[in-house]
Amino acid sequence: MTCCSKKKVMVLATGGTIAMKMDEKIGALVPACTGEDLVAAVPGLDKVAHVEVEQICNVASPNMTPEIMFKLHQRAEELLARDDVAGVVITHGTDTLEETSYFLDITHQSDKPIVLTAAMRGAGDVSPDGPANIYCAVQAAADCSSRGKGVMVCLNNLLHAAGEVMKTHSANCATFASPWWGPIGYVEADRIVYRRVPVAHRIFNPKALTARVDLIKAVTGSDRTYIDFAVAQGCKGIIVEGFGRGNIPPMMEDGISDACAKGVVVIISTRTPGGRVLDVYGYPGSVTDSCKRGAIMGGEISAAKARLKLILALSENPELAGDRKTLQEIFDE
Ligand code: ASP
């Protein structure tokens, strides 16, 4: 059987606005639909693929945790290893979709696709976007040309690479974008059109998630207080989200020195949605300063994605905490 003749797509439902309806009593959206309900509301889906549904959870995506992502990863890979499954679709809330998709991407073992989708409008709203997004996601997951493309996010007919995509608007249906890169492809009526292939990257395979990693956002006037707090809480790593190239207020630096001296990994990321962290400046608080104190440059992924990457890297190999060279390679790939 070729991959094209295997048209079974597994839909793993996790919740999100796509599965919510207005609760008239409180005047706000709440979880209301199962994965089966979502699939049943998509006209013609049975012509695209044979779809089976599993309900993993039914939560708004701010409830998502790395532990749920890990379970999702294990279940998706288990399903993809089956000969009869062409791909997996995951329905999810939009708020943390970019985190879950990234987690799944850097743990993805199979070359078959995982496509995450979502909706900005509730299932009972005027013109909900959920059904069309599910239709396109299943179309992409069932298609042979999606093999080797990693984990993708599909909304508004566009296919984004998990490492590049972000939610850019709090309400608009065109919220998902890949700043500086653009989508890797799109879903057409007759086929999937790919315009580029995401670059290959390291895959992590921890047995369990064991490392706590905290994220601290630098703002003007920040000092070491939250770094000291995170260290006192027993975290194994800290992501410091800096400005521009990754520079931070100098009052944070002694906290970084002390954290690193205690074996805590400190990664410097940037609040800008594009570009790498780099040690091009030499003033106090610059990336050069942070690196001298033991920090690692976090590459071009967002701070939230860097946190997940460090959780996975340290959970797979705790010894990495003492190997700055390898950590630097991992974060700048
Ligand atoms: N708050 C919702 C969630 O992420 C937003 C959505 O799904 O669009 O679950």
Image (cartoon, rainbow, N blue to C red):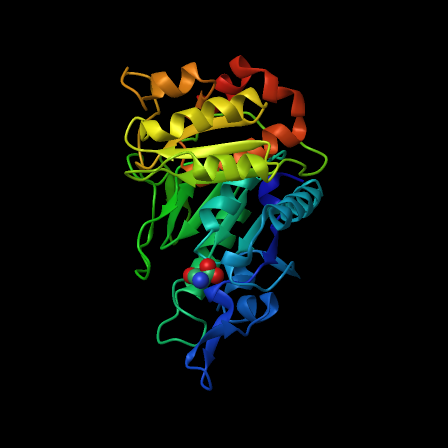
Vertical side of 284 occupied by 10: above or below: below
Task: Work out whether residue 32 or residue 312 is closer to the camera in this orientation and state it.
Answer: 312
* Residue at the extreme bottom: 25
Measured as percent of width and height from the top left, residue 101 is found at 51, 44
Q: Quadrant of the N terminus?
A: top right
Vertical side of 60 occupied by 280: above or below = above
User: In this rendering, does residue 249 appear at all?
Assistant: yes
Q: In which quarter of the image is ligand 1?
A: bottom left
Query: Of residues 176 and 86, which is closer to you in this image?
Result: 176
Which is nearer the eye, 162 or 147? 162
Q: Does residue 182 sit above or below 293 in this rendering?
A: below
Instruction: Write down the quadrant of residue 159 in the picture.
Output: top left
Query: Where is residue 198 shown, x and y percent of the image?
Result: 43, 31
In-image side of 10 versus 266 (left or right): right
Q: Looking at the image, which residue is at 65% across and 32% down?
A: 315
Vertical side of 226 occupied by 294: above or below: above
